[in-house]
Image (cartoon, rainbow, N blue to C red):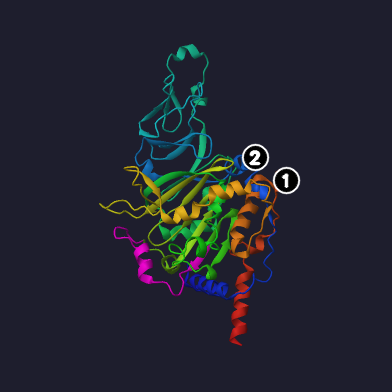
Amino acid sequence: MTDEDIALFKQMMEWEGQRRAPPDGFPDLPDMPAARYTSKEYFRLECEHIFRKSWLFAAHIDEIPEPGCYMTWHNAGDPIIIVHGMDGQVRAFYNTCRHRGAPVVTEPRGRAPRLMCGYHNWTYKTDGSLVGVPQRQDFGNLDMACRGLNPVRCEAYGNLIFVNFDADAPTLTEWLGPLADEWVEFRFDKIRLAARHSFELKCNWKVAMEANMEVYHVPYIHPETVAPLVDAQRNFNSFYPNGHARMLAPAPRQTDRAHVRAIESPPNWQRIETVGELGSTATQSYTLFPNWVSPLSDYFVPPLLFWPTSLNTTRLELVTMALDWGDGPPPDLWTVPDEAMPGGRQMSQIILEDTQFGEAIQQSMESAGFKSVPLSYQEARIYSFHQHCDKMIGIEQVPPELRVKQVIDERWVWPRDPRIALMRQAGRTLAQ
């Protein structure tokens, strides 16, 4: 990010703090249909089109560090295997033997030069090709070259491994768009996996995720945890192609910097020296469509991942990644020891605050009293996210009563943004 970019974003944050109404020309956000959170039909469309066509974070290379290492993964429905091939290449396959459909591997993790189905010992190389069939003579004209494991698209961004079930989807780099360049300073090629834990929530995945997509709630839900770090009034949201977004907010002017440094600089964490001024002094949180939300700073990359397990249940994954922490305990931003379960972990105070109302919200949404969702300008990231959900599904495939109107158009997608001109005009007016 250039010095000019940094100066611009700092000016935009100050401009946001001074406005007394939504920016001129920003579209009014129509109410969203309530049933987007409760409809079985819409949930089916999400699973079929959003989670089958998007790039999904699946693994870190630390989980399969050596050739022959593999892990199973099933957060998006179909069970798959992610394999560090003997040739050094990382691949993904459906965990389904081409013989009778048994899982090829049953252990969550392992290491082997070959993958052998335990049912009839059909054996595959780590590149997915079938190389062993017991009593091969009884299969007649079986063409083993056509019976390799069925692949799932698999690409990496630095040390992070993503999968996509859609053969026609864009590449991962194309999917990331501007984020691929913006994230370079955070050294995704160097960060290690420090912690990864899952928790079950009793609410729709969007209910859980949207609690992390706006700062409107921060003064009320997080008065002692997040509020000292984030000035909700000077928050600037950017919309990106492919449904991604970014929030950027400085610390409140009255913030106790010693308190902030104590949070940002744990004793055994290495600072990511390449991170610039904004990543070091402000809070910036990225939404990576469809289900990743993460603050990025000069100490950590800690994504929260929201996986739908049913219409009204969600698996929340809490991940911490950082530079090598040496001989000390691995850092874990989102969980703390569970005193009731030796060796177990529970959600940290911030996550507990964000998830505390999920089940009650879901129950309330399922009542006759929940009609629609009005959103403010500060919640526009959520509206933009819903717009892209419908685009991924195909707007014409969404029942009319469930659609959101496509009111945030390309004019507002970064790097185009009319608010920049409004901010500069306001600055010229004040100067006069």
- Residue with the mark numbered 1: 396
Where residue 387 sits in the image (x, y, percent)? 65, 53
Q: Which tag, 2 or 1, sits closer to the chain's start?
A: 2
**Label 1 SS:** helix
Where residue 155 sits in the image (x, y, percent)? 48, 45
- Rendered position, 279 above or below 19: above
- Residue 128, labelled with which disc? none
* Residue found farthest to the right: 400
Residue 279: name its quadrant.
Answer: bottom left
Nearer the viewer's eye, disc 2 or disc 1?
2
* Residue found farthest to the left: 327
Left or right: residue 324 versus residue 236 is: left
- Residue 40, labelled with which disc? 2
Comparing 359 with 28, the one in front is 359
The magenta segment is: 247-271
Comparing 319 with 165, the one in front is 319
- Residue 228 visible in image: yes
Is 248 magenta? The answer is yes
Which quadrant would the C terminus be assigned to in this image? Answer: bottom right
Left or right: residue 168 versus residue 396 is: left
Residue 393: name its quadrant.
Answer: top right
Amino acid at circle 1? Glu
* Residue found farthest to the bottom: 432
The structure residue drawn at horizontal position 51% and vertical position 34%, both measured from the top left corner, is 151
Q: Residues within 10 Å of mark 1 (few under 14, many from 20)?
A: few
**Label 2 SS:** helix
Amino acid at circle 2? Lys
